[in-house]
Amino acid sequence: MKNLTKKLLSAVFAITLAAVSSQAIAKDSSKPIVIPTHNWSSQVVMAYVIGGIFESIGDNVKYVSADTQKVYESIRTGDVTISHEVWQSTFGKSFYNAIAKGGVIDAGTHDAMTLEEMGVPTWVVEKGLCPGLPKWEALKKCHKNFVTPDSGGKGRWLEGPQSWHGDVMPDRIKALGLADKWVVKFAGGADALWAELASAKKEGRGTVIFNWTPNFTDAEGFTFIEFPPYKDGCRKADGGDGSCGSPKGWLKKAANYKFPKTHPHAYMTFSRLSFTTPQIGAMAALVDIDKMDHKDAAKKWLKDNEAVWKPWTKAGM
């Protein structure tokens, strides 16, 4: 009888504790969680994916277009609530500067590792358009296979928008002694990069283009150029000569420091969620390959991957 009573009491305690825990994380503010959108597919789709997850637990969500570097100051001041794709090499400095000022917290790291770098679609290597790739020294002798109408007779590197990295790539070309044979042009956005990939493949011409992983291009094949290794202080803005390549890095999440208090359930969910390289690539592919709308792509991903994201929303796990 004692054992039975003990078991009953334990069961009641467990149910009560679960109920209390459930109530504790259910007190999110009705104020909208503000999620930023930038200008590349995985980030936008993931914004709507995370927003959909928040809405599934009863939260209100608002989306705002935000500058990729200034967004961390917006999080610090509370105008934006989170950032879900903090790329180490591009946004790490802005992220840590905002943390140092106060008002931004590190909400955890995705499973996916990142690399943002210049490279070529793998078929360029296979066709021998620049023998010696992926070693950067190969660029000294193959620029003629990468000339475009806007490159003035030089080989062209097509970078992302200048707001992403500033003059990192022009500085690198000069530091490596390639400026007499190559020129950097800046794309207006990610769509322009993918349009260039498609047209270069159709025309069978060489293209050196900025890309990143995780991305939808991982599936088809993309070869990043191997530049001199990155080390702290090697970029021109940090006192170096700028010849170094990009570091492999983390992909973090940022949040306003009040988020855990105003939206405890949503913050718990956000801190738990962690996407892998294939998952992020699949989100981007729904837009860049399947040509879906970002919102529709997010809805499809959420429907197809309930087993992935629903556990993140559960209390006591």
Image (spheres, grey):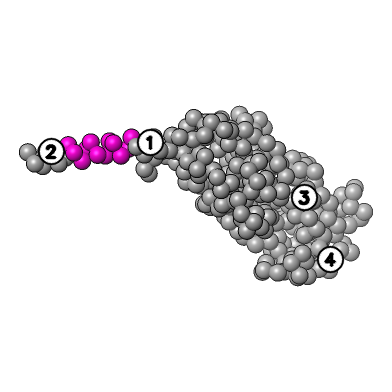
Judging depth in this view, the residue of 162 and 169 nearest the camera is: 162
Q: CA distance from mark 4 to mark 1?
A: 58 Å
To which residue does mark 4 refer?
174
At 76% from the left edge and 43% from the top edge, which residue is drawn? 189
Q: Amino acid at mark 4?
A: Lys
Q: CA distance from mark 3 to mark 1?
A: 43 Å
Q: Secondary structure at mark 2?
A: helix
Location of residue 32 in the rendering, given as x and y in whole percent from the top left corner: 58, 33
Q: CA distance from mark 2 to mark 4?
A: 79 Å
Q: Nearer the viewer, mark 4 or mark 3?
A: 3
- The image quadrant where one finds the C terminus is top left
Q: Say above or below: 227 vs 72.
A: below
Main SS, magenta region, reads helix
Q: Is residue 148 left or right of residue 298?
A: right
Q: Is residue 21 left or right of residue 108?
A: left
Q: Say above or below: 289 vs 129.
A: above
Residue 248's image quarter?
bottom right
Q: CA distance from mark 4 to mark 3?
A: 20 Å
To which residue does mark 2 refer?
5
Cβ–Cβ under 8 Å for marks 2 and 4: no
Q: Is residue 6 left or right of residue 102?
A: left
Location of residue 176 in the rendering, given as x and y in whole percent from the top left corner: 80, 68
